[in-house]
Image (tube, rainbow, N blue to C red):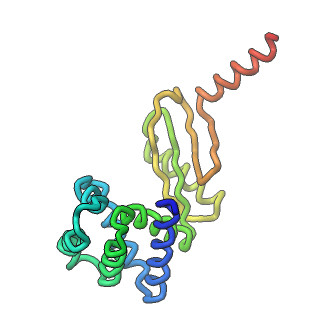
Amino acid sequence: MSVYKVASRYAKSLLDLAQEQGKLEDVKANIEQFVSVVKENTALRAVLANPIITFEKKYAILDQLFKDKFDVSVLAFFKIVIYKGRGEILYSTAEEFLRGYNVIKGVVEATVISASTLSTENFETLKTLIAKELSAEVILTNKVDTSLIGGFVVKVGDKQIDTSISRKLEDLERYLAVRAV
């Protein structure tokens, strides 16, 4: 079974538990903090993935880091996952949890790729337009790709809108190539 499938199943279990206990927002905050810590600390990620390190040590490390900060159900979940020999998927599971949370709350993640960083005004305008079009709350991130020359590319799920100058030049090149024949 793929890591993605396993992580998704564990994440679904944690989502269901959090909803059942009425702690969805608390658990989400804990998981966001966990993702942030693991993202910044590659050594922690390596420890969780290392099969030589015992389950007890892995859990002791997480317990030490998060004992007074996290809900007991989150720590118990971490313990179960680690003792099942799945410490390497905790990070993926946390990311899947956040995706599942967004689905439950009707939040959509979108990315705008532009030739330079968008101004705050343009960023907020684009975010508002996407939210209005999708009738959902939008989490928008801005990535920079100077090869676009100008314009932008918006990605929402598997949909993409490309208004970049580089794309228009490619289209023009294809058009002229067909016309020249």
Residue under the image location 65 percent in, 27 percent down: 168
Q: Residue furthest left?
A: 64
- Picture quarter with the C terminus: top right
In the rendered image, residue 38, in percent from the top left (x then y), is placed at 29, 59
Q: Exactly how many numbered labels are in the figure?
A: 0
Name the residue rendered at 26%, 71% in the picture.
55
Give above or below for 40 relative to 137: above
62 or 102: which is nearer to us? 62
Image x and y of residue 25, in percent: 41, 78
Q: Residue at x 59, y 32 (%)?
A: 164
Q: Quadrant of residue 133?
A: bottom right
Residue furthest to the front in view is 52
- Drawn side of residue 114 relative to residue 55, left or right: right
Left or right: 160, with 48 as reference point: right
> In the visual, does 162 lie left or right of 73?
right
Picture quadrant where residue 162 is located: top right
Residue closest to the eye, 148 or 88? 88
